[in-house]
Image (tube, grey):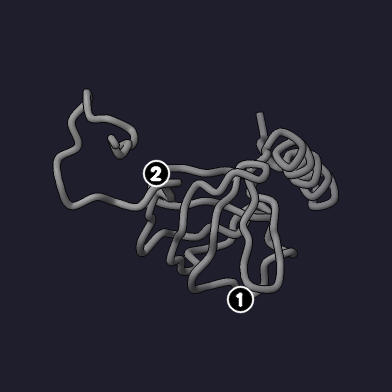
């Protein structure tokens, strides 16, 4: 059996696969000026639709809906099947609290009240 598909059939299959990935993902990349839908995310990178992210590189933020997840430094890796793949040079998890440089006890009071 041959695995060859005509070019227009393969293009249609790729377009349908990318459309399904786009619908199923809530993740998005935000740069200073634009935002792009993430098709797939893995440990050391992610992929975007190839036509939407020309020359994307540098510092970007990854969001799940409106929740900020990661701040990343990225480089373009390769393009395959209509997906542009990017690799992380740095991937930092965003927290909603500032880091502390001391031990915080579990039983510590939330606030101190002045006694008169």
Percent position of residue 69, x then y: 50, 46
Q: Quadrant of the C terminus?
A: top left
Q: Is residue 77 visible?
A: yes
In the image, farthest residue toward the top:
107
Task: Identify which residue is drawn at 55% across, 49% down.
Answer: 68
Q: Quadrant of residue 108?
A: top left
Badge 2, how many Cα within 10 Å: few under 14, some, many 20+? Answer: few
SS class, disc 2: loop
Task: Identify which residue is drawn at 70% across, 39% down.
Answer: 21
Percent position of residue 12, x then y: 83, 45
Q: Is residue 100 above or below residue 16?
A: below
Is 20 placed left or right of 94 in the picture? Answer: right
Q: How many marks?
A: 2
Q: Which residue is mark 1?
A: 55
Q: Is residue 65 above or below residue 1?
A: below
Q: Is residue 76 above or below residue 84?
A: below
Percent position of residue 82, x then y: 69, 55
Task: Identify which residue is drawn at 47% across, 52% down.
Answer: 70
Q: Is residue 5 visible?
A: no
Mark 2 or mark 1: whose residue is earlier in sequence: 2
Q: Which residue is mark 2?
A: 43
Task: Identify which residue is drawn at 18% across, 30% down.
Answer: 105
């Amino acid at each position: 059996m041959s695995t060859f598909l005509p070019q227009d059939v393969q293009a249609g299959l790729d377009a349908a696969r990318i459309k399904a990935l786009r619908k199923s993902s809530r993740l998005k990349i935000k740069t200073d000026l634009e935002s792009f839908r993430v098709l797939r995310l893995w440990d050391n990178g992610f992929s975007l639709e190839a036509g939407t992210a020309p020359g994307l590189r540098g510092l970007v933020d990854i969001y799940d809906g409106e929740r900020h997840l990661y701040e990343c430094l990225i480089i373009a890796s390769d393009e395959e099947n209509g997906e542009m793949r990017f690799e992380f040079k740095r991937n930092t998890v965003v927290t909603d609290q500032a880091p502390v440089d001391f031990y915080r006890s579990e039983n510590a009071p939330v606030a101190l009240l002045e006694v008169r």
